[in-house]
Image (spheres, rainbow, N blue to C red):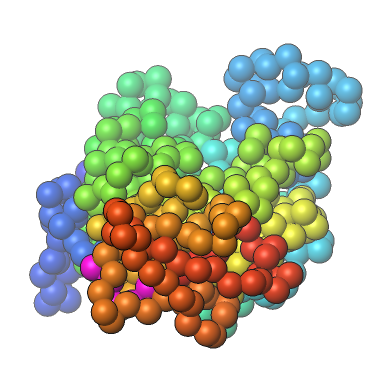
Amino acid sequence: MAVAVQLLPLLLLVASALAGYTPRYTPDWDSLDARPLPAWFDEAKFGVFVHWGVYSVPAWGEWFWYYWKDRKDPDAEAFMRNNYPPGFSYADFGPQFQAKFYDPKKWAEIFEAAGARYVVLTSKHHEGYTNWPSPTSWNWNSMDVGPHRDLVGELGPHLREKNIHFGLYHSLLEWFHPFYLLDKQNNFTTQNFVAAKVLPELVDLVNRYKPDLIWSDGEWEAPDTYWNSTEFLAWLYNDSPVKDKIVVNDRWGIDTGCKHGGYLNCKDKYKPKTVPERKWEMCTTLDKMSWGYREVMNNSDILTYVEIISDLVDVVSLGGNYLLNIGPTKDGVIIPIFQERLLSVGRWLSINGEGIYASKPWRVQMEHTTSRLWFTTKQSAVYVFFADWPMSGVLQLTSPVPTNMTTVMMLGIPELLKWSEDSLDRSLLIYLPKLSPDLADMKIWTLKLKGVE
């Protein structure tokens, strides 16, 4: 099977030649990294991540199987001992993952109301269970075991009806797949697992669902040469049905994170201090303790509305995208507190999204004066986000330089605001309006400045 993987680049080149088409990108990082990122991704700014699989049944966290079987974690072992009979295996959770209340249309409505411009759904996590009828995951997929439904295929059309880009998270590794364990034992000098599972499943996902984004993960134990990442990406960019719109991240081998791929997310909850040279994304999760659903959650474990909006503004000011994760229940329910948080983001974006979507970093990203301030720019306007309403009702800005053409507005209020220039330090003084209760509850507000330098 390792030989078959080695033949993949040749077969792809032969197929391209027969079609009379010369690939634009070659299977090396210099060529692949030079591909321009499709514009939709940078413009989107905000997405929703969905971790959902068999791990949603024990509802202990998405790494439960690993901690129970490999780590022999005392808490995981006690959980099984206290809740399940002796001899109960992880595979026995599969039939209990029924998704009986999964309503993809309703999910799409929630994500639209949240203001998400893209959604990344788990197609397969490290446990190996696939949320679509993968032909190479016999009896361990959502059509054969559990819901008897194509969970991936059902969601995509509803998202696209809402003009929401459809992304798929996909784990390269599977903790306990025998072929993967064999390759690992051989120090990844063999590629049995790659030939039998990784490449067939990635190609199947692309051809079957035509996603806008592939969010690769599970790369950290082996180099990209083991995964045949560059060969797959060259096919994806040159000959696949999504070659012009597809976006990928940077998790394609132990040595590729923060270096190679379509955009950078480096590590979970990554946030740089300054604007990186390449497009990047911060992925974080509403439940601070887990990506998959947990039945034991405290309110203090959930990101607050202010934490979410502060993160979103901070990330976008630095040129990033913000991908916020939820974990539905085994039945496909997005629990009320998760819905409430998502909808609160949507309400904020419905007023302030003008300064978020399709924006760019300004020459200054943030200020720390009498208030926390962030800046973005779009179409010659500068947007100022502030989180602390000054007691005096006057907001001081030191970075924007006013001119005789300067105008100031607050998003959500149609009238222009009064402003003046401080005679001592030439800072811009903005006289804030009285707010309605709805606007007062936003906690973070946005000014739109035009005619400033």
Task: Report x, y in % for residue 344.
Answer: 68, 63
In the drawing, does residue 237 fall left or right of residue 45? left
In the drawing, does residue 305 fall left or right of residue 192? right
- Above or below, 371 against 412 in this view is above
Identify which residue is drawn at 25% across, 58% down.
Answer: 363
Q: Can residue 17 be seen in this view?
A: no
Residue furthest to the front in view is: 423
- Count of all numbered marks drawn on residues in the image: 0
Task: Report x, y in % for residue 186.
Answer: 34, 21
Query: In the rendered image, which quarter is residue 37 located in?
Result: bottom left
Identify which residue is drawn at 40% across, 20% down.
Answer: 185
Q: Give the range drawn in magenta.
A: 448-453
- Above or below, 23 against 297 in this view is below
Nearest to the observer: residue 69 or residue 336: 336
Nearest to the observer: residue 81 or residue 373: 373
450 within the magenta span:
yes
- Above or below, 273 against 130 in this view is above
224 within the magenta span:
no
Nearest to the observer: residue 133 or residue 429: 429
The image quadrant where one finds the N terminus is top left
- Above or below, 69 against 417 in this view is above
